[in-house]
Amino acid sequence: MDLKQIIRSFPDWPKKGVIFRDIMPLLKNPQALKYSVEEILRQWGGKEIDLIAAIESRGFIFGALLAQSLQKGLVAIRKEGKLPGETLKVSYTIEYGSATMEMQKDAVKQGQRVLIVDDLLATGGTAKAAAELIERLGGVVVGFAFVVELLELKGREKLKGYRVTSLVTY
């Protein structure tokens, strides 16, 4: 299945010079969604994974489907101020400024092997922050699974040393 034919592109959004890759048509298409999840499962099949960590917000969709398919737990990596209880925070730079992500302190146990999932890899700042949070909690990041990767933004370079997979590249 050619996911590029399903994913929409919006030039100059949210600002001039940016091409926004919209996965909403993929989510609306049950065959494309099923195919996407199955392809990520194929890429990560046979790997020892204890937990799926999903990055807010579209990563939650793919993360939940993968966790269900693998019969593994799902933990959330969210924007600052969205999680109750004690959290760890990491601040970082993104395409349009800066951001802070957080996880609950009891989300990952020492030594748990975690696959980080999100819809899109751009500059890699959010993904790198997610890895830092998991590792600070004692988890082992087995890698990253993305649906879309924007090659010109070189996010993969920030994730050197980790296994990174993506279904579609632009």
Image (cartoon, rainbow, N blue to C red):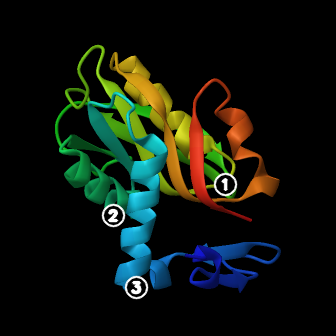
Residue carrying label 1: 122
Q: Position of residue 37 (x, y in %)?
A: 39, 61
Residue 35's image quarter? Answer: bottom left
Seen in the picture, residue 166 relative to 29 is either above or below; the reply is above
CB atoms of marks 1 and 3 within 8 Å: no
Q: Secondary structure at mark 3?
A: loop
Residue 95's image quarter? Answer: bottom right
Q: Amino acid at mark 2?
A: Ile
Residue drawn at x 24%, y 53% as measured from the top left: 69
Q: Position of residue 101 (x, y in %)?
A: 43, 42
The circle on residue 29 is: 3
Viewer can see residue 139? yes
Q: Quadrant of the C terminus?
A: bottom right
Q: Quadrant of the N terminus?
A: bottom right
The circle on residue 53 is: none
Viewer can see residue 78? no
Nearest-to-viewer mark from 1 and 3: 3
Q: Amino acid at mark 1?
A: Ala
Q: Secondary structure at mark 1?
A: loop
Q: Quick check: 17 left or right of 68?
A: right
Along the polypeptide, which appears first: circle 3 or circle 2?
Answer: 3
